[in-house]
Image: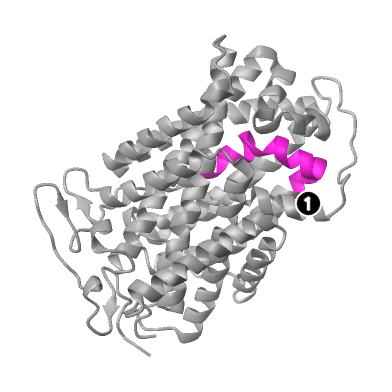
Amino acid sequence: MGGEPPPADGANIEGESPQAEPTLETDEATITDDAELERTLGLSGGLAIGIGTMIGAGIFVFPGLAAGRAGPAAAASFAIGAVVALLVALPASELATAMPKSGGGYYFISRGLGTLAGAVVGLSLWFGLVFATAFYLVGFGYYAVDTLAELGIAVGEGLVIPIALLFGAGFTILNVTGTENAAKLQNGIVALLLSILVAFLGYGGLDAVGLIGDPATPEQFAPFGPVPVLTTAALVFTSYLGFAQVATVAGEMKDPGRNLPLAMVGSVLVVGVFYVVTIFVATSAFGSEQLSQFGETAMVEVGRHYLGAAGAFAIVFGGLLATMSSANASVLSTSRAIYAVSRDALLPKRASRINLRYGTPHVALGLAGGPILVLTATGEVELLAEVASFLHLIMYGLICVALIALRRNEPDWYDPDFRVPGYPVVPVLGAICSFALIGFMQPASQIVGVAIMLMTAGWYAYYARDVNLKGEL
């Protein structure tokens, strides 16, 4: 049993691996190993990252796709996703308060389960966030085109991808200029978005139950049976990735012992309620079959159904804000995942350089933005969403396993400010549910996900096999 904390600012290196030697390089703009990210994010910033990332896809992109797969029971699919997310958010909160460092799940797993697991998860998290961000940007492109259409400017779907690419580059540049700037944008977007949603869903809910209009015609709750409910839960789980993205910026959170658990658990609860209500309102407006025909922007037609042209515009504007928020927060989190694995010598040290002018990891942001733009250009909405879910569910399951390992060993440095209630039941269920949900994904997503994990394991064997991250446990 060791009395030393896990390595925080670099790896413990066994042997003489030249590529893993720590270096310090300073010029007018950059510094590497000894620089730390500033703690500028409070509870509101953490909640804004969590809610802002999650609120977009689940409400504005998935209702039509989910209703086509599961009917009104898509509400249960979102509820299942929320339960799984909570079972992971609680263990992640404990680990985050013990290790409030940038990198989130990667950092926890590498210190709890060792370098190989950490390398596979850390590099896979990079790709998982890239897939998720590309998915959000494609959704943003659809809503941008619809917003223009509502304003009487018909540009056609041919501009969806160019708009998504343009704004993806813009969000990357914004995050280079400072985390605080990105957080201010995030806070403003989320506040305005929640105001729109509360008003719309409140009215739509009253109309759906017949209190201010004609009651909706009842529809069979699960017309396709129970299995599509689970496959849909696997698809829409991308909607719940935001709580873990809070942990990736733990190194920039003020009072992390208090703010991290509140931000992670609170964001899941708030967003889960919004999702279930949204599906109820949407399937009450139209039958699930008709709703599915509207595709990625089905909620625009739901808004039009309840409030006419004003409702349609409110939704397209809300969808624009939501997908913008998700993409912006995901660009931030992707760069922090890259920054963390580079600091631990699993990637070249150059990737963890911090820009002295802005205090941001500008090289990591470049490594995030480039692949995001490449995947955004594909426009494959469902594949992007499921691959992102696959890679995150692997990480979530291993987070729960890492918590069990650290609780069993209880190293001297492990002193979290928050402990999971119901231990060990909660982390065991979290691990089982995370891994089980992967089995309900479409084969193409599973194949891509496994291929990425094998590729990251190969990189570990080639580049970082001499790195030891587990510490004295």
Quadrant in which the C terminus appears:
bottom left
Give coordinates of residue 358: x percent, y percent: 21, 43
Residue type, label 1: Val
Secondary structure, magenta segment, majority class = helix
Q: Which residues are magenta?
A: 51-76
Decide if residue 134 is on the left or right side of residue 232: left
Please, which residue is most extreme toward the top here? 152
Q: Tell me which residue sits at (62%, 51%) in the image.
A: 386
24 up-or-down from 202: above or below: below
Q: Is residue 154 visible?
A: yes
Depth check: give the residue in front, 228 or 442. 442
Is residue 54 located in the magenta-colored stretch of the structure? yes
371 up-or-down from 402: above or below: above
Please, which residue is most extreme toward the bottom here? 1
277 up-or-down from 415: above or below: above
Quadrant in which the N terminus appears:
bottom left
Depth check: give the residue in front, 370 or 57. 370
The residue that mark 1 highlights is 229
Give coordinates of residue 442: x percent, y percent: 70, 55
Depth check: give the residue in front, 70 or 446. 446
Give coordinates of residue 463: x percent, y percent: 33, 72
Decide if residue 412 is on the left or right side of residue 156: left
